[in-house]
Amino acid sequence: MEQASTEIQAPNPNPSRTLNDIPDEILVQILSLIPTLEAIHNSLVSRQWRSLWSRLPFLDFSYHLFPVNDAEPLPVTSHRFAEFVDRALILRPNSPIKTFRLSFIFYHYYTSHVDSWVRSAVTRFRARELDLDFFIDKEYHLRSEEDRAPRDKYDFPFSVLRNGCVESLRLTYVDLALPASMATVGMSSVRSMFLEDVDLTDQMWERLILGCPNLEDLELQNGGMDQNLRICSTSLKKLKFGYFYDCYYKNTVEIDCPNLVSLSFDCISFTQFRLKNASSLVEFHLNMVHLDKYYDSWSKAVKLLGSAPNVKCVNVQNWWFKLLTSKDSFPKTFTLHNLSLLELRTGYTQYDLVGMAAVLELCPNLETMILDYLHKIEVDESLPEAILNKPVRFNMPRLKQVKMLKFFGSEDENNFVTLLKKQGVVLQKITLFPIKVEGNSSHQYPPIVLCGNPRECEVTGSSPP
């Protein structure tokens, strides 16, 4: 009798596999990386894939990604887009999603469509993040003007959030239809809100904030107001204003938020700033276009720091040299005792060094200073020769490290580094981040670190070619 063979066949190292062999969970993760429109198109590759898009944790309907026929007018494309969104929402099961995002060119005759989409996002899909953008891009607004079609603002029905789970709300280019009883209804789920191009009266702003008792993060961009905007909230921790340029009106902003941690102003020109109950504030950011006509708003905003005794981090541009000649100077008691980190956008001219010395006098406990290059549209105003010719002395008894971002290697920058090394008492490290600009492009080089005894710093990096 022949002995039975005990040889075992080795598995084929290259079995024939197809995309259908990939687990659905992985395919859903892949489709989650792209907008809903593309996810649906990719789901048509295979019959097995066709339902995968309906399992995505988000819905992202982006008008600018929708196929456009250049020969058809804008309203026709908008109509096809609306039909696509209608169909997609009808076919999707009522399972919860994380995010519902919509960008669309809105006209009043699409009101019922958008109302239905928003209700579906909040009530059917229980979205936690709701992002509606009806501006999209300036290009689309120019096209609508060519088509002579008036642009309308969508009236966002704020009461739809009443029974929803929306925690993060982002609205761009809308009007808000606020319920009459905002205070009693309460949108308790909303914790973060971003509003851009939203015009409200001062009373409506107050009602809106009062109706969101758990709101922690609020950002207002390019919005409309009457004359006295008041932000009063015990829950708010982060507040940012952006692009409130309105120099023709007497506008006042008053902030009364006892638990506010971070406050930011980006390109604003309020006439008056008031800050109350700011003992919790630790971060302050201020960015202005460097034109002399905006210095007044800059100085008024900076003076708010006098009402924030515990601020630790300040990010501001270097306009401090003007304090030496301004009639409306800061109080002599103005000192940032708890400031440990200063981020300063600055140049390195004599004016800038004078300004830097002025702000360092106000920060006796500063430990870290980060310097970023400031592009100046206007030339600095002239200072008296007595100030310009006086040797610059930096008061920095606790300063341990300085970082110079966008280091071009100019004569002014090198003179500043030399000045730092001479006057640094406990300065341990100076880090330079070299950059070289050629035409419209720039190249970042590895950082150069000067460390050790500040008076005898040695280079531990390499300089750019």
Image (spheres, rainbow, N blue to C red):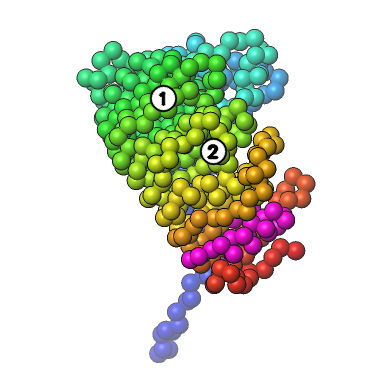
Give coordinates of residue 236: x percent, y percent. 32, 34
**Camera-side mark, 1 or 2:** 2
Which of the 4 image quarters holds residue 136? top right
- Residue at the spot x=48%, y=23% of the render? 271
Residue 401 placement (x, y as % from top left): 51, 61
Can residue 135 be seen at all in this image of the molecule? yes
The image shows residue 386, relative to residue 221, as above or below, that is below
- Decide whether residue 419 is among the magenta residues: yes
Classify 10 Å Cα crowding around label 2: few (below 14), some (14-19), many (20 and above).
some
Where residue 142 sits in the image (x, y, percent)?
65, 19
User: What whole-number distance in Å separates the C-alpha atoms at marks 1 and 2?
Assistant: 23 Å
Q: Amino acid at mark 2?
A: Leu
Compared to residue 17, the image places residue 255 above or below, namely above
The residue singled out by tag 1 in the image is 253
Q: Nearer the viewer, residue 33 or 280?
A: 280
Per the rendered image, the range of residues in magenta is 404-426
Q: Is residue 233 left or right of residue 340?
A: left
Q: Nearer the viewer, residue 459 or 71?
A: 459
The residue located at (50%, 50%) in the rendering is 360
Q: Which residue is mark 2?
A: 323
Q: Quadrant of the C terminus?
A: bottom right
